[in-house]
Image (spheres, helix red, strand yellow):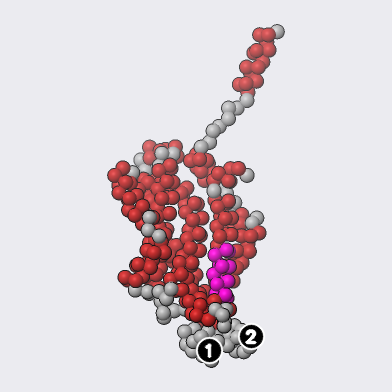
């Protein structure tokens, strides 16, 4: 009887499949092969993300329609200075100390502030991807040299670096965008490097390499798609950070004097905080709403694109 029981127990053990330990890299490959729910549909499960998307769409529409809604240059004086809000319906939000239409400035400012935020994040992602891919995939002395350069930028406060570059290179929109992007790329570079160092030794990458595929094909089709999700999430944070940095530069009077931005409006209004506090409060609230919306979307994207969280559901 004991022998029969032992044989039965061994058969039972053999019938139970062994647990498959799926690491982070293999999990990403399996997730990549399995059909995924579209990101836009997954976002619908996050009410706060929907609110953030709605706010950003509204701001984007205002920015796109600003030249149609307010064809006059927002930098021009159009009325007496400091008209209070809702006292003259020709200027619903009043005028600033220079007699400029506040509502027109907000619309055109949305156009510039959102553009600077998106373009600065694009510059940071482009530089960070290039540095991170080379450092993480090549390794060795190339990795060491590039990481020392990244650390040099990382130890310098991004806002201080932007101030120095704008002071030396001028306060044009292109220079401000480049300065903010250059100060923000280290976080992307280190993130991409870490992802590539992990993924380059993954089984699916080695399988592709054994089939004779070149390095460019391995990077573009095997490794980079699996490394992009955290970059996308971080990129959304960089957009919000860039808007804040630009607002800080404009507040200090280092913005482009030829264009209207939310930061420039705050800088003009700070001289009249007691008499006309709304000149600073209104663009400040728009900046706060924009950054909050971007962060809500970024949090939702992190839950959707994070492979560990996807497997945990």
Query: Could one spot residue 143 in this view of the protein?
Result: yes
Please state which of residues 198 and 209 is positioned toward the viewer in this rendering: 198
Find out whether residue 101 is within the magenta segment: no
Residue 73: x and y in percent read 47, 85
Label drawn at residue 3: none
Residue 122: x and y in percent read 43, 62
Compared with residue 196, is residue 290 higher up or lower down, i.e. above or below? below
Question: Is 204 placed left or right of 106 in the picture?
Answer: left
Taking the spot 65% from the left edge, 20% from the top edge, the residue there is 12
Taking the spot 51% from the left edge, 85% from the top edge, the residue there is 97
Q: Name the residue under label 2.
A: 86
Which secondary structure lies at badge 1? loop
How would you rate the neighbour count of disc 2 (Cα within 10 Å): few for under 14, some for 14-19, many for 20 or more?
Answer: few
Image: magenta residue range: 281-293
Q: Residue furthest front?
A: 274
Residue 113: x and y in percent read 48, 71
Q: Name the residue under label 1.
A: 81
């Amino acid at each position: 009887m004991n022998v029969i029981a032992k044989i039965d127990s061994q058969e039972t053990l053999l019938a139970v499949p062994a647990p498959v330990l799926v690491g982070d890299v293999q999990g990403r490959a399996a997730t990549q092969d399995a059909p995924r729910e579209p990101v836009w549909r997954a976002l619908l499960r996050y009410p706060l993300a929907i609110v953030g998307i709605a706010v950003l769409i509204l701001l984007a529409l205002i920015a796109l329609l600003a030249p149609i809604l307010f064809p006059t240059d927002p930098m021009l004086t159009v009325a007496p200075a400091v008209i209070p809000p809702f006292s003259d319906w020709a200027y619903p939000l009043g005028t600033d100390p220079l007699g400029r239409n506040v509502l027109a400035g907000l619309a055109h400012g949305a156009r510039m502030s959102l553009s600077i935020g998106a373009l600065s994040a694009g510059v940071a992602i482009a530089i960070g991807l290039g540095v991170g891919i080379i450092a993480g995939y090549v390794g060795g002395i190339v990795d060491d040299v590039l990481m020392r350069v990244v650390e040099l930028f990382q130890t310098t406060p991004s806002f201080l670096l932007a101030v120095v570059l704008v002071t030396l290179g001028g306060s044009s929109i292109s220079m401000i965008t480049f300065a903010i992007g250059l100060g923000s790329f280290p976080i992307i570079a280190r993130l991409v490097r870490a992802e590539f160092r992990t993924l380059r030794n993954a089984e699916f990458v080695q399988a592709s390499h054994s089939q004779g595929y070149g390095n460019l094909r391995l990077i573009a089709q095997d490794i980079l798609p699996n490394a992009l999700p955290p970059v996308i999430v971080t990129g959304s944070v960089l957009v919000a950070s860039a808007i804040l940095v630009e607002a800080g530069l404009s507040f200090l009077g280092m913005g482009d004097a030829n264009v209207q931005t939310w930061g420039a409006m705050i800088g003009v209004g700070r001289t009249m905080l007691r008499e006309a506090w709304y000149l600073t409060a209104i663009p400040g609230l728009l900046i706060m709403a924009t950054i909050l919306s971007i962060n809500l979307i970024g949090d939702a994207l992190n839950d959707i694109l994070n492979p560990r969280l996807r497997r945990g559901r």
